[in-house]
Amino acid sequence: MVKTALITGVNGQDGSYLANLLLKKGYSVYGIVKDNQDLKSLNNLSYFGIQDNIKLVKGNLENIKFLNNEIKKIRPFEIYNLAAFSSVGKSWNDPILTARVSGLGALNLLEAVKNYSPGSKIYQASTSEIFGNSVDPDGFQREDTQMRPLSPNGLAKLFAHNSISNYREAYGLFACSGILFNHESPIRGIDFVTRKITDGVAKIYLGHNKNLELGNLEIKRDWGFAGDFVEAMWLMLQQSKPKDYVIATGKNFSVKDIVRIAFEEIGIDDWRKYVSLNKKLLRPAETFVTKGDFAKAKKDLGWEPKTSLKDLIKIMVRNDIKLQSV
């Protein structure tokens, strides 16, 4: 029997990588896109050439009536809730919308599943932003590390994260969260610092720009590859019992490290003369260091990251040079 999966936010970075993975595994894939989405302009799905292989539905997580109807009609075997107001920086500009989409949206989905398809397995895209600056004594963040978010994005995601565990315990739903640390790819949105760097470096290489404006170069993140991370999402829903997992690389690098790697790819060692600080890009509150321990995922799921940050940034720079050359 062909398994049916529903992916919210299917045209996002993670949604596109996940849809591609599930199609390769023989799934029938439904995908929810925004109400105002032009179905002829699905750039991320087009990156994989799979836009015509997905049954697309327009809607949003704020509309409980829409979710009820779709869950009742599709009754998916697996649901991956990836729709969110995912940019931490932008979440400061509209915290209320962030809370409605990333927080209450997950609760709306849980209600729809509870009422109309309680046998569906649910994956919730959680985030390392829920930890804020909390770390264990050894500097790592784990599933049971104290959660003290420092951004509207983190606050909304923590609400969703706790809603998943609550509905799992209260109603017996197969519902789990993947606490994903930063994960990037060539189709990462330009609002995210990794892509901003690789796009900016590509423009400098091609002579389109002379410099790159960035915010805090000293913050450190645990950065991985989206293609590796979506495999962990799928593995979580193949288990006999639902559990939450940290998905990370166990290593962290600063923004400065990424800048250095990106400029090295175009043959520039002295990157400092091309980079300037823009104080407007600094956030009101900042998570300074993240580093995740994926030991539980490795033990239970047999999962571990495959792609190094250095290889990933090089791939992203080359892809942006290609895009800018068209």
Image (tube, rainbow, N blue to C red):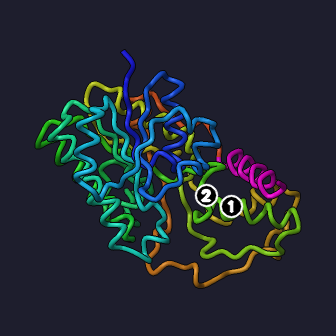
Q: Which residue is mark 2?
A: 253
Is 306 included in the stretch rendered in magenta? no
| Residue 305 pos. (x, y %) | 55, 38
> Secondary structure beneath disc 1?
helix
- Identify the image quadrant of the C terminus: bottom right
Left or right placement of residue 49 versus residue 128 in this view = right
Reply above or below: 183 against 231.
below
| Residue 318 pos. (x, y %) | 78, 50
Residue that protrudes farthest toward the left in the picture: 170
- Identify the image quadrant of the N terminus: top left
Reply above or below: 323 against 69.
below
| Residue 278 pos. (x, y %) | 65, 82
Between 103 and 181, the residue placed more toward the observer is 103
The residue type indicated by label 1 comes to Asp
Q: Residue at x 46, y 68 (%)?
A: 287
Between 67 and 282, the residue placed more toward the observer is 67
Reply above or below: 130 against 246.
below
**What span is in magenta?**
309-326
Label 1: how many Cα within 10 Å (few below 14, some 14–19, many 20+): some
State which quadrant residue 51 falls in.
Answer: top right
* Number of marks present in the image shown: 2
The residue type indicated by label 2 comes to Phe
Q: Which residue is mark 1?
A: 257
Between 295 and 265, the residue placed more toward the observer is 265
Query: Which disc is residue 155 wearing?
Result: none
Between 186 and 290, the residue placed more toward the observer is 186
